[in-house]
Image (cartoon, rainbow, N blue to C red):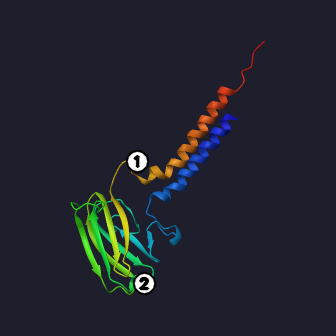
């Protein structure tokens, strides 16, 4: 019986690992309700995407950018109210909360009736914040934290996606161990 449980556990772990392979890549085609690149405030929504076609021509990123260098970004103004107002975009190295942080790029757009604003920036390794400000009444502001090529097991998205299956496997092993300890011992006569 223990052998069957172990085989089932290993099979389940491999199954979850295979399912999570797609999760470590770019966020891909998901519905707006489940898209972590979508922000909403004051009844309006924006979608922010970045691309690095020199590394992967088909990948789209939002907050985790895998490589440094030339990064193309696209802002989709989903709601008409944003398309009718001036939009300011600022990319800051860091959180943008202190005066010592460097402004990497600053853009201002007044003509975006198609709802798309795009640009490019050269990004080094580190943390960045993208601020998108709609200059309406009242003004609306969206914030996107970016992580550019921050390596390491704990910062890698594979860690967060594999945590659940790893915990399940460890709990199963603990239960098997506890079952073996609590099993009544047969007394030989």
Q: Which mark is residue 171?
A: none
* Residue beneath the point at 59% across and 43% down: 10
Secondary-structure class at tag 1: loop
**Where does the image place residue 131, in percent across and percent down from the top left?**
33, 70
* Residue beneath the point at 21% across and 60% down: 100
- Seen from the viewer's position, the closer of residues 151 and 8 is 151
Q: Nearer the viewer, mark 1 or mark 2?
A: 2
Q: Please, is residue 133 above or below residue 103 in the view?
A: below
**Where does the image place residue 166, in percent across and percent down from the top left?**
53, 44
Secondary-structure class at tag 2: helix
Q: Quadrant of the N terminus?
A: top right
**For residue 38, what is the image quadrant?**
bottom left
How many numbered circles does the render carry?
A: 2
Residue 41 visible in image: yes
Residue 56 visible in image: no
Q: Which mark is residue 81?
A: 2
| C-alpha separation, residue under disc 1 versus residue under disc 2 | 40 Å
In screen coordinates, is 21 left or right of 82?
A: right
Q: Please, is residue 129 above or below residue 14 in the view?
A: below
In screen coordinates, is 16 left or right of 104?
A: right
Label 1: few (<14), some (14–19) or many (≥20) C-alpha neighbours in 10 Å:
few
Q: Please, is residue 159 above or below residue 31 in the view?
A: above
* Residue beneath the point at 56% across and 48% down: 14
Q: Residue furthest top?
A: 189
Label 2: few (<14), some (14–19) or many (≥20) C-alpha neighbours in 10 Å:
few
Please give the residue where the numbered disc 1 appears in the rendered image: 154
**Where does the image place residue 172, in percent across and percent down from the top left?**
61, 39
* Residue beneath the point at 49% across and 55% down: 21
């Amino acid at each position: 019986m223990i052998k069957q449980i172990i085989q089932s556990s290993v099979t389940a772990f491999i199954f979850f690992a295979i399912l999570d392979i797609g999760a470590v890549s770019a966020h891909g085609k998901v519905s707006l309700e489940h898209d972590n690149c979508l922000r909403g405030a004051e009844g309006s929504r924006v979608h922010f995407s970045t691309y690095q076609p020199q590394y992967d021509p088909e990948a789209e990123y939002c907050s985790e950018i895998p490589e440094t260098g030339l990064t193309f970004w696209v802002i989709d103004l989903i709601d008409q109210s944003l398309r009718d107002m001036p939009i300011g975009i600022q990319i800051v190295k860091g959180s943008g909360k202190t005066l010592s942080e460097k402004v990497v790029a600053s853009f201002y757009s007044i003509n975006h009736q198609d709802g798309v604003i795009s640009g490019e920036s050269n990004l080094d390794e580190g943390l960045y914040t993208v601020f998108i400000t709609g200059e309406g009444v009242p003004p609306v502001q969206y914030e996107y934290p970016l992580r550019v090529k921050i390596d390491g097991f704990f910062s890698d998205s594979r860690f967060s996606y594999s945590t659940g299956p790893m915990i399940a496997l460890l709990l199963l092993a603990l239960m098997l161990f506890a079952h073996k300890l609590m099993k009544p011992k047969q007394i030989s006569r």
